Amino acid sequence: MPVPPTNLPPRPLLRDEVRSRLRDAIVDGTLAPGEQLRDLELAEWLGVSRTPIREALLDLARSGLVEASPGRSTVVAPVDDAAVRAAAAVVAAMHRVAVIESTPHLTDDDLARMTDANAAFIAAHAADDTDAALAADRAFHAVAVDRADNAAVRTVLALYGPVLERAERLRFGSHDAEASAARHAELIRHCAAGDTVAAGAVAEALWLHLLPHPTAPKETA
């Protein structure tokens, strides 16, 4: 029997909704690193069955936000510098692709959205508002990602972007807001000039700038 037509708007799969809720709780620190994740407790919290919880946790384990071992407890993964470096390198490359592909198609309205988002980013940092700063940064980079409309880029960013955002949030106090805002402005200038190579390089540098520095080895006597 063919599927009957419907006028109802598309609705996200329950698993995807659960994954988003759990991902956001991990990224914003509601679920802290090392915290045990019990299917039943999470199911009661979100008002769903245990099946979508288990599926969502498996997805989050693939991105490195959750550590799940057969026969052992599932926990929120620690913020590991090596994992953050790996995620930053991949995320940076994807944003470079998005900017290169989108630059020839950016409109004046797109550039205005980027400028407004950068102003909001600066204001949020001045107010020491972590949530607003991260939201403004997401809005800034989303312009190029949306305009590029590259499904592969979206998929990779959805997988590894939250890993980087969680690290950004934890290191918010030491983040160099002025340098990031200046790079944002530089990116806007290159995009407005239609310089795809320069714009892509700046976009990549913005994310590589977030790489944690490896701990220097201690000197021996």
Image: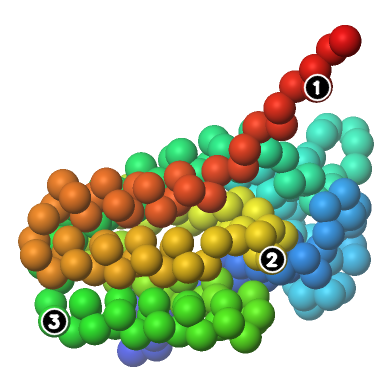
In front: mark 3 or mark 1? Answer: 1
Residue found farthest to the bottom: 7
Q: Which residue is mark 2?
A: 173
Q: Nearer the viewer, residue 166 or 19?
A: 166
Q: Quadrant of residue 72?
A: top right
At x 55%, y 61%, the residue is 176
Of the numbered discs 2 and 1, the one sitting upstream in the chain is: 2
SS state under label 2: helix
Question: Residue 108 has which mark?
Answer: 3
Q: Is residue 9 above or below residue 57?
A: below
Residue 111 lies left or right of residue 64; in this view the side is: left
Of the numbered discs 3 and 1, the one sitting upstream in the chain is: 3
Q: Are marks 3 and 2 in contact (CB under 8 Å)?
A: no
Residue 155 lies left or right of residue 202; in this view the side is: right
Q: Are marks 3 and 1 in contact (CB under 8 Å)?
A: no
Question: Label 3 neighbourhood size at 10 Å, few (<14), some (14-19), many (20+)?
Answer: few
